[in-house]
Image (spheres, rainbow, N blue to C red):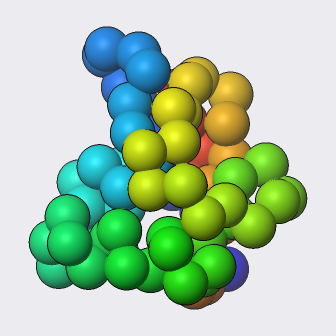
Amino acid sequence: MEKRIAKIKKTPVELYKILKFENLAASGGEAKYLIADGYVKVNDVIETRKRKKIYPGDIIEFDDFIIEIK
């Protein structure tokens, strides 16, 4: 698993935007599809809400990536 740290300046940020900005999804639409189909975990729980609010301290897991939000 590759671990990344994503620093956000404005909180909260919607989950699909994190996937898009970290280049884990080619577009916002693709990110929303991946989330809705249960491919993404937030804090060890499968998350299907595309607009889930993400805050510093959250951990996102997708594919072979772990993203720590700072």
In the rendered image of this protein, does residue 6 appear above or below residue 32?
above
Residue farthest along the top direction in this orientation: 10
In the rendered image of this protein, does residue 58 appear above or below residue 12?
below
Question: In this image, 2 relative to 23: left or right?
Answer: right
For residue 41, what is the image quadrant? bottom right
Residue 60 in sight here: yes
Residue 66: horizontal and vertical position, in percent? 62, 63
Q: Count of labels shown?
A: 0
Residue 22 in sight here: no
Q: Which residue does the image show at 44% across and 80% down from the upper left?
A: 34
Question: In this image, 2 relative to 47: left or right?
Answer: left
Q: Which residue does the image show at 53% across and 42% down from the upper left?
A: 52
Of 21 and 1, nearer the camera is 21
Residue 49: horizontal and vertical position, in percent? 55, 55
Residue 1: horizontal and vertical position, in percent? 67, 80
Q: Which residue does the image show at 75% across and 67% down from the upper left?
A: 46
For residue 7, what is the image quadrant? top left
Question: In this image, 48 relative to 28: left or right?
Answer: right
Residue 33: horizontal and vertical position, in percent? 37, 79
Residue farthest along the right direction in this orientation: 44
For residue 57, what is the image quadrant? top right
In the rendered image of this protein, does residue 12 appear above or below residue 41?
above
Q: Which residue does the image show at 55% across and 84% down from the upper left?
A: 37
